Amino acid sequence: MIVVLDRCVVLYNLLVMELTGYSNPQKNLDAVFAALADPTRRAILMRLSDGQASVGEIAAPFSMSQPAVSRHLKVLERAGLIERGVDEQRRPARLKAEKMALAVDWLSEFQRFWGASFDQLDDVLTGMKIAQKKEIDNE
């Protein structure tokens, strides 16, 4: 019974999201953000921004095993952030920027909000500086 209710709630929430325009047409965006949520995976992506690398080359600076790095690479690959090739006995990984661009595009929708928030913060800080200067001048 609880499972059926949970499914109904999920379906209802998806319907509300669709009707209010909150639905995400890029289904893979959740996987991209989930992959980017881990600091090790972000470090791996930074390493791959310099060029392709094998699992051993990626694992070298980390204090973890190659199988652990491979699991991180699988998450990044499923999210579409990297691709793995075959080069004789190696499987080098290389960065794919297209899916990351989806995340950047989604985040850029909030740039207007961030700008306004920073402007408000700037106004508050300016007001505090003026008040502090008046206090010092009155002493």
Image (tube, rainbow, N blue to C red):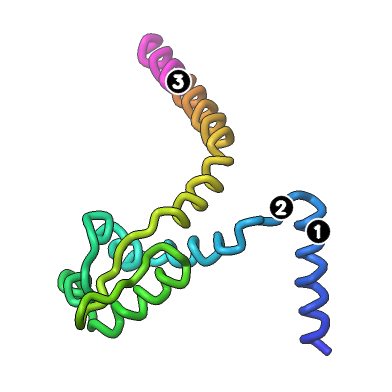
Residue type, mark 3 in image: Thr
Query: Which secondary structure, mark 3?
Result: helix
Q: Position of residue 18 (x, y in %)?
A: 77, 56
Relative horizontal placement of residue 2, taking residue 103 as reference (left or right)? right
Q: CA distance from mark 2 to mark 3?
A: 36 Å
Tag 2's secondary structure? loop
First in sequence: mark 3 vs mark 1 = 1
Q: Does the magenta segment cover residue 45?
A: no
Picture disc at residue 126:
3
Residue 85 image-quadrant placement = bottom left
Q: Which residues are magenta?
A: 128-139
**Left or right, residue 46 beside residue 122:** left
**Magenta highlight on residue 134:** yes
Pointer 2 local density, CA inside 10 Å: few below 14, some 14–19, many at least 20? few
The amino acid on which the numbered mark 1 sits, given as a three-letter code, is Val
Q: Position of residue 46 (x, y in %)?
A: 28, 57
Earlier in the chain: of badge 2 and badge 3, it is 2
- Assess whether mark 2 and mark 1 are in contact (beta carbons under 8 angstroms): yes
Of tags 3 and 1, which is closer to the observer? Answer: 1
Mark number, residue 16: 1
Query: Where does residue 8 sit, x and y in percent of width and height?
Result: 82, 76
Whether residues under marks 3 and 1 lie with C-beta atoms below 8 angstroms apart, the answer is no
Residue under the image location 33 percent in, 72 percent down: 84
> Where is mark 2, residue-wise?
22
**Secondary element type, mark 1:** helix
**Residue pushed farthest bottom?**
1
Residue type beneath disc 2: Tyr
> Disc 1 to disc 2, how far (Cα)?
8 Å
